[in-house]
Image (cartoon, helix red, strand yellow):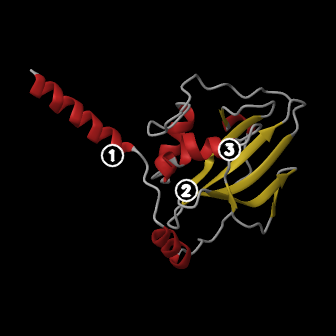
Amino acid sequence: MRLLLAFALAAFAVQAVAQRPVEPSEWEKEQERRNWKEGEIKLPAYPRTESLIEFEVAGSFRFFIDPASLAVGPDGVVRYTLVARSPAGYANITYEGMRCSTLSFKVFASGNDGKWTERHADWRRIEPKSMNDSHYQLRTNYFCPDRRPIDSAAEGVEALRKRGHPRARAAPHSGVKPLPSSG
């Protein structure tokens, strides 16, 4: 009986260690920097309010992803349209990319009055913040579980609809909030 218990505990420990994300070595990071080439950007259709999916972020703003814009490129970048809505109802709309391997994001375009304006921004590291940490939530709970990009847009949409990716450590699991029809 003790042998069986010891075997079960050992199997559990091996599984727990195997699921823990492994930080890339400095050599691997340098190879990634040297060999990586960013793919071409094609701006998506402007987001439609009725199709947006909300995700949880602490703070007064509400955050949404346009599922029609979600894509995973051959360069490993998860691209998406992010809508941040203020308590007064104003929307900040951006088309962005997230690199899970470097824990960074970049804004490719800003939206206003149904049109995109391209931006030439640098990649910025994603850090947890005390307020409106939307990029950290997207990275941790939806698009980069265990620091690897999702495999497909469908996987990302499912994670958003289920309120977190199954591989995410701190994925919330409450129901999806509907987008208000006015504001």
| Type of amino acid at the residue the image marks with label 2 | Cys
- Amino acid at circle 3: Pro
**Amino acid of disc 1:** Ala
Q: Which residue is mark 1?
A: 18
The spot of residue 176 in percent (x, y) is 61, 26
Image quadrant holding the N terminus, namely top left
**Residue 116 — which label?**
none
Q: Quadrant of residue 64?
A: top right
Task: Tell me if label 3 and label 2 are in contact, CB under 8 Å.
Answer: no
Q: Earlier in the sequence, mark 3 or mark 2?
A: 2
Disc 2 or 1, which lies upstream in sequence? 1
In percent of width and height, residue 15 lies at 29, 39
Crowd class of label 3 (few under 14; some 14 to 19; many from 20; radius 10 Å): few
Q: Residue at x 59, y 47 (%)?
A: 139
Residue closest to the far right: 88
Residue 26 as seen in the image, left or right of residue 131: left
164 or 48, which is in the foreground?
Answer: 164
- Position of residue 11 in the picture relative to residue 148 (left or right): left
| Tag 2 near tag 1, CB within 8 Å | no
Q: On the image, numbered disc 2 is attached to which residue? A: 100
Q: Which residue does the image show at 43% across and 53% down from the upper left? A: 22
For the C terminus, give its image quadrant. top right
Q: Which residue is mark 3?
A: 128
Tell me the element at label 2. Answer: loop
Depth check, mark 3 against mark 2: the one in front is 3
| Mark with earlier residue (3, 1) | 1
Residue at coordinates 68% horizontally, 25% vertically from top-left? 178
> What is the quadrant of residue 12 in the picture?
top left
Q: What is the distance, in whole Å, between disc 3 and disc 1 at their CAs?
A: 25 Å
